[in-house]
Amino acid sequence: MKVEQISIFIENKSGRLAEVTQVLGEAGVNIRALSLADTSDFGILRLIVDKTDLAKSTLKERGFTVNKTEVIAVEVPDRPLGLAGILQVLDRSQVNVEYMYAFVERCGENAVIIFRFDNTENAIRVLTENGIKVLKGDQVYSM
């Protein structure tokens, strides 16, 4: 039920984001979801890709600093209060959301949101016990 995410640390200067996407594209890696957070000096680009290990090794070969972490993909009702309901379930169980971002595809009538939690196993348990669908990695990579 976990999804592998890669995080790339990039200098906050023109062309670096384009370089990352070019390197991945030339390696045949498809980006499925992304989030970019920046400061004045550097950015953290978080990606869900279809070939995580290839993406990580290719970027490292090109001099990028890359880490792999586990996140969770959750089906969220695509309607007003859909996300709020899930966040309330997590809050009642004192599960902390470190960050989240949207996925590029929908799953039927639902949106897909990528979450990073402070306690991944507990978050999976809370979500599934409350009838909230957590997607498997292979489902996410092939959407």
Image (tube, helix red, strand yellow):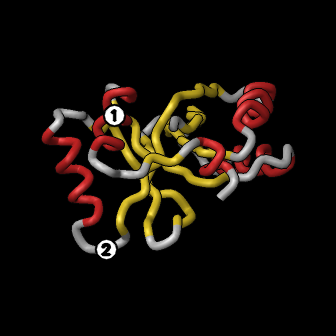
Q: CA distance from mark 2 to mark 1?
A: 24 Å
Task: Identify the element where label 1 is drawn.
Answer: helix
Q: Which mark is residue 69?
A: none
Q: Residue 40: horizontal and vertical position, in percent? A: 42, 40
Disc 1 packing (10 Å; few <14; some 14–19; many ≥20): few
- The kind of residue tagged 2 is Arg
* Residue shown at 84% from the left, 48% from the top: 28
Residue 122 vs residue 4, the one in the foreground: 122
Decide: is 114 above or below 109. above
Q: Residue 68: horizontal and vertical position, in percent? A: 59, 27
Dot placed on the residue nearer the N-terminal end, 2 or 1: 2
* Residue shown at 47% from the left, 36% from the top: 71
Quarter of the image with the C terminus in it: bottom right
85 displayed left or right of 31: left
Disc 2 or disc 1, which is closer to the eye?
1
- The kind of residue tagged 1 is Arg
108 displayed left or right of 100: right
* Residue shown at 45% from the left, 73% from the top: 109
Q: Residue 10: horizontal and vertical position, in percent? A: 58, 36
Task: Identify the element where label 2 is drawn.
Answer: loop
Disc 2 packing (10 Å; few <14; some 14–19; many ≥20): few
* Residue shown at 56% from the left, 43% from the top: 136
Residue 105 vs residue 128, the one in the foreground: 128
Decide: is 65 above or below 104. above
- Picture quadrant of residue 59: top right
128 displayed left or right of 1: left
Q: What residue did someone put label 2 on?
A: 79
Q: Residue 53: horizontal and vertical position, in percent? A: 74, 30
Decide: is 72 above or below 33. above
Decide: is 142 above or below 121. below
Q: What residue did someone put label 1 on?
A: 125
